[in-house]
Image (cartoon, grey):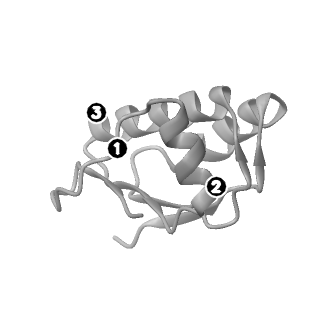
Amino acid sequence: MDPAAVQLSPVLDLTAAAALAAELLPYRGRPLSIDASQVQRLGGQCLQVLLSAEHTWQADGAAFAIADPSDRFLADWRLFGAPDFTADPSPVATEFQP
């Protein structure tokens, strides 16, 4: 099954967290690729949503990937000290593709 694709908004701040969670939820249990190429600001609440989604997809045995992260997305991600995603090709692994 080809992964569903979600394009992240440029601004992922406190006000975007609930909408992001609601946008991801319908894809639960399906392979999902998240395009982070347009992100200009990643806030803590959206980071938590993405980390939670990664764990949820892994628990469900579905592939989850954050693809093409912008430089700002990567900088903000690392600023929070969040762990990098693994690059294991197994169907339950999450990929973080810088």
Contact between labelled residues 2 and 1, with CB atoms less than 8 Å apart:
no
Residue drawn 67% across and 46% down? 23
Q: Name the residue under label 1.
A: 84
Amino acid type of the residue tagged 2 in the rendering: Arg
**Residue position for label 3:** 59
**Cβ atoms under marks 1 and 3 closer than 8 Å:** no
- Secondary structure under tag 2 reads helix
Say which element carries label 1: loop
What is the C-alpha distance between the residues marked 2 and 3?
Answer: 29 Å
Q: What residue type is labelled 3?
A: Ala
Q: What amino acid is at disc 1? A: Asp
| Residue closest to the eye, 31 or 83 | 83
Q: Give coordinates of residue 11: x percent, y percent.
A: 79, 48
Q: Residue at x 67, y 56 (%)?
A: 8
The circle on residue 72 is 2
> Does residue 78 appear to the left or right of 31 in the view shown?
right
Q: What element carries label 3?
A: helix
First-in-chain label (1 vs 2): 2
Q: In which quarter of the image is the C terminus?
A: bottom left
Q: Nearer the viewer, mark 1 or mark 2?
A: 2
The image shows residue 84 at horizontal and vertical percentages of: 34, 44
Alpha-carbon span between mark 1 and mark 3: 18 Å
Which residue is drawn at the image coordinates 64% and 36% (left, top)?
21
52 lies left or right of 19: left
